[in-house]
Amino acid sequence: MTFSGGSYDEITRWLWNFLTSHAKRVDPRIEILVEAGDGREGKSYGARFRIGDRLGPVSEFDFAEVAANRGGLAWCTALAERTKERARIELEGVAAAGAR
């Protein structure tokens, strides 16, 4: 049995929790900001990684894709790996900025 579907607000919370938990495995200072609502309501999300004052670019997520796949092991595993990779890239940016 897979767990998928859900309201826009439920999926927003799930996505934030999922991204946060995997990003913090790379570095506990990383915060995730999920852009939802307004023009995105029911359609999409934007997620940004923040470390201190550094705010990364927006990663786009389609609401229907996340809702349909959040219960799938393969999809979640791939998203976890992409999340950790983005977190490492953001950390490298912080380190590079600090070295200047």
Image (spheres, rainbow, N blue to C red):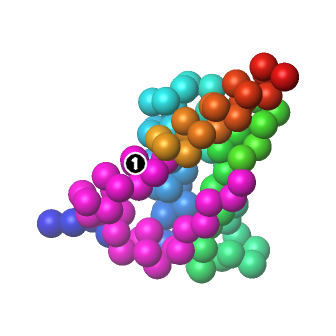
The image position of residue 27, as x and y in percent, is 54, 26
- Asked where in the image residue 28 lies, by quadrant, the reply is top right
Quadrant where the N terminus sits is bottom left
**Mark 1 surroundings within 10 Å by alpha-carbon count, few (fewer than 14), some (14 through 19), many (20 or more):** some
The image position of residue 46, as x and y in percent, is 65, 63
Magenta portion: prevailing SS class:
helix
Magenta span contains residue 60 = yes
In this view of the protein, which residue sits in the foreground, 70 or 94? 94
In this view of the protein, which residue sits in the foreground, 49 or 7? 49
- Where is 20 relative to 53, above or below? below
Provide the residue span drawn in magenta. 57-83
- Is residue 51 toward the left or the right of residue 44 in the image? right
The image position of residue 12, as x and y in percent, is 55, 61
**Residue located 64% across and 38% down the image:** 90
In this view of the protein, which residue sits in the foreground, 69 or 2? 69
Quadrant where the C terminus sits is top right
- Asked where in the image residue 70 lies, by quadrant, the reply is bottom left
Secondary element at image label 1: helix
- Is residue 54 toward the left or the right of residue 24 in the image? right
- Asked where in the image residue 29 lies, by quadrant, the reply is top right
Magenta span contains residue 14 = no
**Residue located 72% across and 47% down the image:** 56
- Where is 14 relative to 23, above or below? below
User: According to the image, label 1 marks what residue?
Assistant: 80
- Where is 25 relative to 63, above or below? above
- Where is 5 relative to 77, above or below? below
**Residue 31 seen in the current view:** no
Hey, which residue is sitting farthest top in the picture?
99
